[in-house]
Image (cartoon, grey):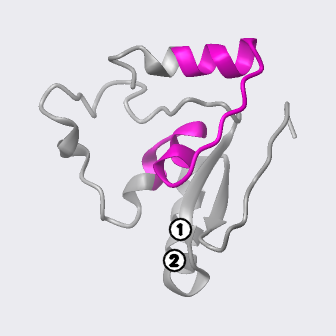
């Protein structure tokens, strides 16, 4: 998203022009502060991004930040992921909103 310029375009459309952003699954993750939550389950491999991705670089895990100081964890099921999320969210240093697969949604306008 960064390399193509899509990240900046989405930020501009949402923050400056008031466009509505809707994200499901990975789309919800990238709306937050960091994409680190995508790696918590161990299902996703950052190396799939290709050899040009520098995961040691500052900001490598930064998401769009459309919602400040919040990251998202989709496909949450307390029985399966409750303990993992409780342990991992402490390392974020900011809020982590869990999103279940039950049709629930989170609506954020401004800072609330």
Q: Secondary structure at mark 1?
A: strand
> Which residue appears at 19% of the width and 44% of the height?
48
**In the shown orientation, is residue 16 left or right of residue 33?**
right
Of labels 2 and 1, earlier in sequence is: 1
**In the shown orientation, is residue 45 left or right of residue 34?**
left
Q: Secondary structure at mark 2?
A: helix
Q: Is residue 32 magenta?
A: yes
Query: Does 2 appear above or below 100?
Result: above
Q: Is disc 1 surrounded by few (<14), some (14 to 19) or many (20+) residues within 10 Å?
A: some
Query: Does 65 appear above or below 108?
Result: above
Quarter holding residue 65: top right
Q: Is residue 104 magenta?
A: no
Query: Does 53 appear above or below 44?
Result: above
Q: Which residue is mark 2?
A: 81
> Which residue appears at 53% of the width and 68% of the height?
75
Quarter holding residue 21: top right
In this view, the residue farthest toward the left is: 51
| Rendered location of residue 50, percent (x, y) | 15, 34
Task: Report the quarter where the N terminus lies.
Answer: top left
In front: 68, or 102? 102
Which label belongs to residue 102?
Answer: none
Q: Which residue is mark 1?
A: 75
Can residue 65 be seen here? The reply is yes
In the image, the segment drawn in magenta is: 9-37
Task: Report the quarter where the C terminus lies.
Answer: top right
- Count the marks: how many? 2
**In the shown orientation, is residue 93 left or right of residue 50?**
right
In front: 22, or 45? 22
| Disc 2 to disc 1: CB gap under 8 Å | yes
Q: Nearer the viewer, mark 2 or mark 1?
A: 1
In front: 22, or 2? 22
């Amino acid at each position: 998203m960064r390399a193509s310029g899509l990240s900046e375009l989405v930020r501009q459309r949402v923050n400056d022009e008031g466009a509505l952003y809707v994200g499901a699954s990975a789309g919800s993750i990238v709306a937050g502060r960091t994409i680190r939550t995508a790696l918590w389950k161990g299902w996703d491999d950052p190396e799939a991004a290709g050899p040009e991705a520098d995961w040691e670089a500052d900001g490598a895990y930064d998401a769009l930040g459309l919602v400040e100081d919040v990251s998202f964890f989709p496909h949450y099921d307390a029985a399966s992921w409750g303990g993992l999320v409780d342990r991992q969210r402490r390392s974020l240093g900011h809020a982590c909103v869990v999103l279940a697969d039950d049709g629930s949604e989170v609506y954020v306008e401004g800072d609330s």
